[in-house]
Image: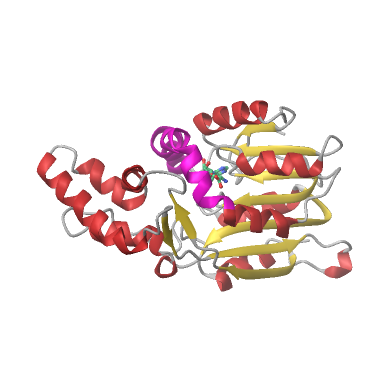
Amino acid sequence: MGQGPVANTEQREYWNEVSGPKWVAVADWIESQLSGIGRLALEASGAKPGERVLDVGCGNGFTAIELAQRVGETGRVFGLDLSRPMLKDAAARAQAAGVPRIHFLEGDAQTERLDPSYFDLVFSRFGVMFFDDPAAAFRNLHDSMKPGGRFLFACWRDRSLNPWMTVPALAAAEYVEIPPPAAAQAPGPFAFADADRVTALLSSAGFVDVNARSIEPGVRIGAGRERQQALDFILQMGPAGAALRNAQADEGLLERVKRAVEERLEPYWDGDGFVMDAAAWLYSGRTPIADSEGGQNG
Ligand SMILES: C[S@@+](CC[C@H](N)C(=O)[O-])C[C@H]1O[C@@H](n2cnc3c(N)ncnc32)[C@H](O)[C@@H]1O
């Protein structure tokens, strides 16, 4: 496996310079927020002992570790990501979890030259919505899978169904300019919210039995932590976090933003975290077993 032409330059920079170091610093917080969705995705993936698995956009390595535990000694897990700080964190975490055999690769899923017909399963939890050319990325991943190989990934549904992201941002927006939401299909957390578009992309890339299943597991932010700690975490993340970083210069403004976010989140605190609705898609598909199954690409 090797590196093809460079693409996704903006995302590479973002996940190496801006977001990656932040995700490493608050890895455990993010994991406690995402682990419920991760569990549903891992169950749906059907990872089995002996299988070869690719975790796309593996980030801090949490799902790669669970996949390694599922495929066991006879299986192989590769974690692919373009963020060096997150891969370093992932490798240390795998070592500590007793699964040092995971292969963490620095590369872009869109262009990385992966061994053809190699993987039984390609998996991702929120690591595939950042492609600037999703059709190319899906084709690349398709070609790395064995006939009958499974593709299973989780992506956020529309932002209107994900108040955990929008409520803090709207509160901050009363006082500071928050970054405008990316265009509907631009790389970002909600790029794959449109299930018709994504399932069509998967079919065009050659996948069959393509499906989108909605899950609405909700998120609990800050379980087992003090309320103020949980608020501080929320205030670092997403559009509200970006707005706050821009407001750093003005202490008074910063305090007003913090208070607005705190007030808006008040109703969601249940004594053990902020409990908020969240909705995601579990997308799935597989590569054809025989030519007669006729993926449009394969
Ligand atoms: C939202 S984070 C999710 C991380 C991890 N899967 C998790 O659930 O904790 C998105 C991850 O995708 C990675 N990523 C973004 N674009 C990528 C690409 N083109 N190829 C590989 N990884 C990519 C980022 O570096 C980041 O680690």
179 over 109 or under it: above or below: below
**Residue at point 89% right, 63% down?**
290
Instruction: State the image coordinates of residue 176 (x, y, percent, origin top left).
Output: 18, 53
Q: Nearer the viewer, residue 111 or 164?
A: 164
Instruction: State the image coordinates of residue 65 (x, y, percent, origin top left).
Output: 68, 38
> Can residue 195 be seen in this snapshot?
yes
Name the side, left or right, on which 146 lies relative to 281. Answer: right
**Residue at point 38% right, 36% down?**
18
Magenta stretch mostly in which secondary structure?
Answer: helix
Q: Quadrant of residue 184?
A: bottom left
Instruction: State the image coordinates of residue 108 (x, y, percent, origin top left).
Output: 58, 40
Instruction: State the image coordinates of residue 152 (x, y, percent, origin top left).
Output: 68, 57
> Can residue 2 be seen in this snapshot?
no
Q: Nearer the viewer, residue 249 or 132?
A: 249
Name the side, left or right, on which 249 lies relative to 167. Answer: left
Q: Nearer the viewer, residue 161 or 80?
A: 161
Q: How many marks?
A: 0
Q: Quadrant of residue 100?
A: top right
Q: Which residues are magenta?
A: 9-35
Residue 187 on the magenta span: no
